[in-house]
Amino acid sequence: MKVIILIVSFLLEGVISNFVTINGYLAPLFTLVALIMICPFFENSADYYKYAFFTGLAYDLIYTDTIIFHAIIFCFMAFIIIRLNLVLSDNFINALIILALSIVFYRVITYGLLVFINSIHFEIVALGYSILKSLILNLLYGMIMFVVIKKVPKRRRYFD
Amino acid sequence: MYKKRGFDKRYLFILVVIAIALVLVVLAVSLQKDRDLNPIEKVAKDIGTVVLKVVSAPFNFVHDSIEEMIEKDNVYEKYKELKNKEEQIDSVVSQNDNLRSEIDKLKDTLELNTVLSDKVFLNATVVSRNIGYWYEEVTIDKGLKNGIEKDMAVVTPKGLIGKITKVSNYSSTVQLLSNDHMSDKISVKIKTKDDYVYGLISMYDSKTNTYTVEGISENEEITEGADVVTTGMGTVFPSGLMIGKVKKVTTDNFDLSKVAEVEASVNFDDLDYVTVLKRVSN
């Protein structure tokens, strides 16, 4: 179940990227959304970090030209997601709050690092805009995924 | 779900510092402009491209069908427009033949093997666009096996969009001109009444889809709507590639040179099919 959610979201992110405009109002981050939504299905946090690392690695290798950058960032995101899940219980509103906070963290961290190594120029408006456009589509995807996951029997959710 | 364990905060701090340092080093190395993909990256990108092409196929079919339906509504207007163009095409073809033969003659006279505008065309399909948001890149389904090499210019029928930055066997990454580092210092020329004036692109503004061209001589007269094309100077872009049209002309802060705001001819949001240009070398 977890693997299927990750693979489908990973591929869907690539496909949807072809249909949304580059400078438009939507930016798919479905892989990250899937990683956030499957977090409660892990009984062991070490397994969750492994999933995060390998998903990030696939993201690096297939979608970007970076080497293990997303693998490390996704592990860091996994750390944040686990902490947020400890604080907030597993319900619809809290899932969306965790999703929104995680996307904001992800955007700020990646933007900050790219500015730090001088790959892009710092522009607060660009950062705010990127966060806003990431939230719209991904919160919607998160909502759909939450509803779909809830329909799956509990015992199946914990299987790989 | 998770067992809370006591964790020494000093170790956590050290871990975070090491992780940040590692990420920065990895990021700086992997985003180096002259870095080539390693064999693992090449294989992964090729597999990813094939999988994405297969997964995208039904989505593309639906998208193309919808576009086709919309286009069918305007078919009569398009027919009339094409009919008008058809009447002009004979004269354009003969003019083109004439110019081509003149170029050949001049090349013979000057004993040149190639001119700056000589190029070979390779068509490609965009497989994924701008994943990760910050990188301003697209991935195309042609690679080394199709004759694509690093630094080749990439265009659409409307004009220049960027250049090849990474190549694997069956896919390539195109960095778009909308990227901060790409549009910087591209040599361009602006059509004036009977000649061209030269300048350099200094930046791209995604909100207005415009480039800023600097370093234009103060004495030159530039009209709004003038065509802006590449000069062919430098090693990457051949000459004559459409960049856009002049929207506004101002002077720089010191009134020493003119600055032109150029509206990009390409819509970076609508890139489905592209053409890779290979400059013919000696």
Image (tube, coloured by chain):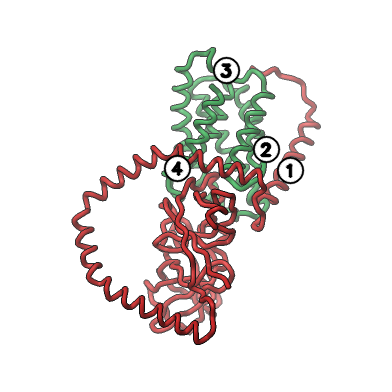
Chain colours: A green, B red
Q: Chain of mark 3?
A: A
Q: CA distance from mark 1 to mark 3?
A: 33 Å
Q: CA distance from mark 4 to mark 1?
A: 31 Å
Instruction: Please indicate whether residue B171 sits to the left or right of residue A147 in the image.
Output: right
Residue A128 visible in the picture: no
- Nearer mark to the viewer, of 4 and 2: 2
Same chain for the residues under marks 4 and 2 in the image = yes
User: In the rendering, which numbered label is found on residue A72?
Assistant: 2
- Nearer mark to the viewer, of 1 and 3: 3
Q: Position of residue B230 (x, y in %)?
A: 49, 71
Crowd rating for badge 3 (residues with CA inside 10 Å; few <14, some 14–19, many 20+): few
Dot 3 or dot 4, earlier in sequence: 4
Residues at badges 2 and 1 in contact (C-beta under 8 Å)? yes
Identity of the amino acid at label 3?
Answer: Phe
Q: Position of residue B18 (x, y in %)?
A: 77, 40
Q: Is residue B26 above or below residue A55?
A: below
Q: CA distance from mark 3 to mark 4?
A: 32 Å
Q: In the rendered image, which residue does mark 3 sit on? A: A159
Q: In the rendered image, which residue does mark 1 sit on? A: B22
Instruction: Please give the name of the residue rendered at 41% of the width and 52% of the height, measured from the top-left corner.
Output: B270
Identity of the amino acid at label 4?
Answer: Leu
Instruction: Please give the name of the residue rendered at 60% of the width and 24% of the height, measured from the top-left corner.
Output: A85
